[in-house]
Image: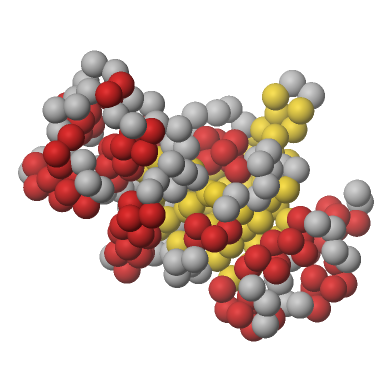
Amino acid sequence: MLEVKNVTKRYGKNVACNDVSFTLEPGTLTVLLGPNGAGKSTIIKSMIGFLKYEGSITINGLSTKTAEARKYLGYIPEMPSLYPTLTVIEHMEFIARAYKLTNYKERINMLLERFELDDKRKKFGDELSKGMQQKLNLCIGLLPDPDLILLDEPMLGLDPHAIKELKNYIEEMRVAGKTLFISTHIIDSVDMLWDRTIIMQDGRIRANVTRDEIEGSGKSLEDIFFEVTEGISKEDVISSGSGIDAGEKAGESEK
């Protein structure tokens, strides 16, 4: 289980994340939604230990700032960061050795085949198109097969076939008991099975809802998103069953 408690991240006078708290239960898929600049990437980079912040983030009771906790975490960034002079297969071999993986050849083959990179094994990083770079980015992040995977805008730059394959793979990981956390600002990209959605805006969590709560309200995820982010009254959102947390209600009343 991963717990984010009262996390605040400041860049000078700018507050990118403001007192953010939530929990990722084992074996669940949580979607993080929000407009551009909502603080989604900041909270993910804090979770993976890339940023300093106020508050605490733990996985199985261990701070994610520790090497031990990071063994459980996988991270697929929004923008691929590849080595221009390494080939596709060399990227995969590099990650396998960095993580000290064993018997990884078959898994490399499976990932490259599923994401249509099998015939690009000898291509250098800077020879790949943007879409192929993103596919390799996914393969690199998925290779260690971590228990908890953070994906930041994973479908940007992918063609429809690759998006479908990624969604299928995400569902397979969910069924296998992996914990997944997917950040995006494109609601249509997360029409797969999910358990919980967190909606951020202006660095704060505005809603934290389960699939059952949304389905019980008779509204779509898109309806809830626009109600929350476009300033509909608290009373209307609460009566819709959207599950806004008490702490967020208080926070909104102060604005």
Q: Foreground residue, 19 or 29?
A: 29
At horizontal 45% and vertical 66% (from top left) the residue drawn is 192
Vertical side of 68 occupied by 29: above or below: below
Q: Is residue 54 found left or right of 145 in the rendered image?
A: right
Q: Foreground residue, 187 or 23?
A: 187
What is the quadrant of residue 89 in the picture?
top left
Q: Foreground residue, 90 or 253?
A: 90
At horizontal 53% and vertical 41% (from top left) the residue drawn is 44
Question: Is residue 247 at least partly visible in the picture?
Answer: no
Vertical side of 143 occupied by 182: above or below: below
At horizontal 21% and vertical 41% (from top left) the residue drawn is 117
Residue 173 in the image: x percent, y percent? 31, 60
What is the quadrant of residue 234 in the picture?
bottom right
Image quadrant in which the N terminus is located: bottom left
Q: Extreme top residue here? A: 85
Residue 56 in the image: x percent, y percent? 58, 41
Q: Is residue 131 found left or right of 250 in the rendered image?
A: left
Residue 46 in the image: x percent, y percent? 55, 36
Q: Is residue 236 found left or right of 33 in the rendered image?
A: right
Q: How many marks?
A: 0
Q: Extreme right residue here? A: 254
Question: Is residue 123 at least partly visible in the picture?
Answer: yes
At horizontal 38% and vertical 54% (from top left) the residue drawn is 160
